[in-house]
Amino acid sequence: MILKKVKLTDFRQFYGTVEIEFATSPEKNVTIIHGENGVGKTALLNAIKWAFFAKVTSNFRNPGNLVSDTAKKNGKHTCKVEIEFIEDKRHFMLHRNYDQRSLKNVLKIYEKNDDVWSASLPEPELVINSMLPKE
């Protein structure tokens, strides 16, 4: 699996929308995430894990508090993580949304064919698990 892009909206420290593009060139395919403590490196890792599996790492503080505090102060109660990735030369877009009030999250996954994204694929958890098993 090759990650192309991660887009976070109101997820933890990331207020508003933040987009990170990963290096995918065959010659230069390393992306370094660097920053001081507390600026969101672990939150980024957990956003990716949460988007795929609705789980976070065991040391992630307040795992039920995913919506940015700033967003909540501004009356927002949802967050979203979108991941564009390539698996076996197929392009996918994963979306997971979370509503803090209802404590519900929704996963959708789309596949790109001829530069057009499909409708959401059925049973997205099974699609993800076939590519990247939880274990």
Image (cartoon, rainbow, N blue to C red):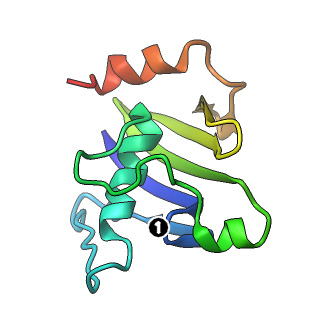
Residue at which label 1 appears: 20
Which residue is nearer to you in this view: 75 or 22? Answer: 75
Task: Name which quarter of the figure residue 76 lies in.
Answer: bottom right
Which residue is outermost to the bottom?
36
Find residue 69 and report its image quarter: bottom right
Q: Residue at x 48, y 57 (%)?
A: 6
Residue 90 located left or right of residue 105? left
Place of residue 102 in the rendered image (x, y in percent of width and height, measured from the top left): 70, 36
Looking at the image, residue 80 sits to the left or right of residue 119; the answer is left
What secondary structure is found at the residue carrying circle 1? Answer: strand
Q: Is residue 43 above or below residue 13?
A: above
Instruction: Identify which amino acid the numbered label 1 is placed on.
Output: Ile
In the image shown, does 49 or 131 lie closer to the viewer? 49
Image coords of residue 31 (percent x, y): 27, 69
Q: Residue at x 58, y 65 (%)?
A: 68
Q: Quadrant of the N terminus?
A: top left
